[in-house]
Image (tube, rainbow, N blue to C red):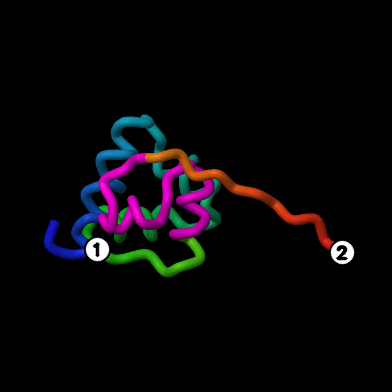
C-alpha cells in the first residue's frame, strides 16, 4: 500500500465489513461520533487516541492498522495497577 492513511482506510472498511459492526455500535465503543467513522471510511486518518482505542477494541496492533505490517497478530493489552 502506498501510504499509512490509505492502508488504514482499506483495513478499517474491510474490518468493519468482516465484523459486521454498525457505525453506531462502533462509535459508542470507541467514544467517537458516527461522522468520525464515516470520515475514516472516506480517507481521513484518525488521531492517535481513537486509533489506540480501535487497536485495543479490535485486538489488532496500530502497526497493522497503519499498514506497517501485514501480520494480523492479536494485540495483548496489559493493564498496570495504580500505585
State which region is magenta. 51-72
Q: Quadrant of residue 62?
A: bottom left
In this rendering, is residue 54 above or below 47?
Answer: above
Q: Secondary structure beneath disc 2?
A: loop
Q: At 45% from the left edge and 68% from the top edge, which residue is drawn?
A: 48
- Quarter of the image that includes the N terminus: bottom left
Is 42 rendered above or below residue 17?
A: below
Quarter holding the C terminus is bottom right
Name of the residue lying farthest toward the right: 83
Label 2 neighbour load within 10 Å: few <14, some 14-19, many 20+? few
Residue designated by label 2: 83
Q: In the image, is 54 to the left or to the right of 65?
A: right
Indicate the position of residue 2 as horizontal and vertical percent values.
Answer: 12, 62
Q: Position of residue 68 (x, y in %)?
A: 28, 58
Taking the view exactly as shown, the residue that stands out farthest to the bottom is 47
- Closer-to-camera residue (26/18): 18
Asked whether 55 falls inside the magenta stretch, the response is yes
Q: Residue at x 43, y 45 (%)?
A: 60
State the residue at coordinates (26%, 46%).
Answer: 70
Element type at mark 1: helix
Q: Mark 2 or 1 closer to N-term?
A: 1
Residue 50 percent coordinates (x, y): 48, 61
Q: Is residue 74 left or right of residue 68?
A: right
State if disc 1 and disc 2 touch (CB < 8 Å).
Answer: no
Residue in the image at 47% along x and 44% along y: 26
- Closer to the camera, 27 or 73? 73
Residue behind mark 1: 4
Amino acid at each position: 500500500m502506498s501510504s499509512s492513511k490509505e492502508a488504514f482506510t482499506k483495513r478499517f472498511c474491510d474490518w468493519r465489513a468482516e465484523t459486521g459492526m454498525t457505525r453506531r455500535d462502533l462509535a459508542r465503543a470507541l467514544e467517537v461520533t458516527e461522522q468520525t467513522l464515516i470520515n475514516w471510511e472516506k480517507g481521513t486518518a484518525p488521531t492517535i487516541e481513537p486509533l489506540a482505542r480501535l487497536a485495543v477494541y479490535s485486538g489488532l496492533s496500530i502497526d497493522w492498522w497503519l499498514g506497517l505490517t501485514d501480520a494480523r497478530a492479536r494485540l495483548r493489552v496489559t493493564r498496570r495497577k495504580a500505585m
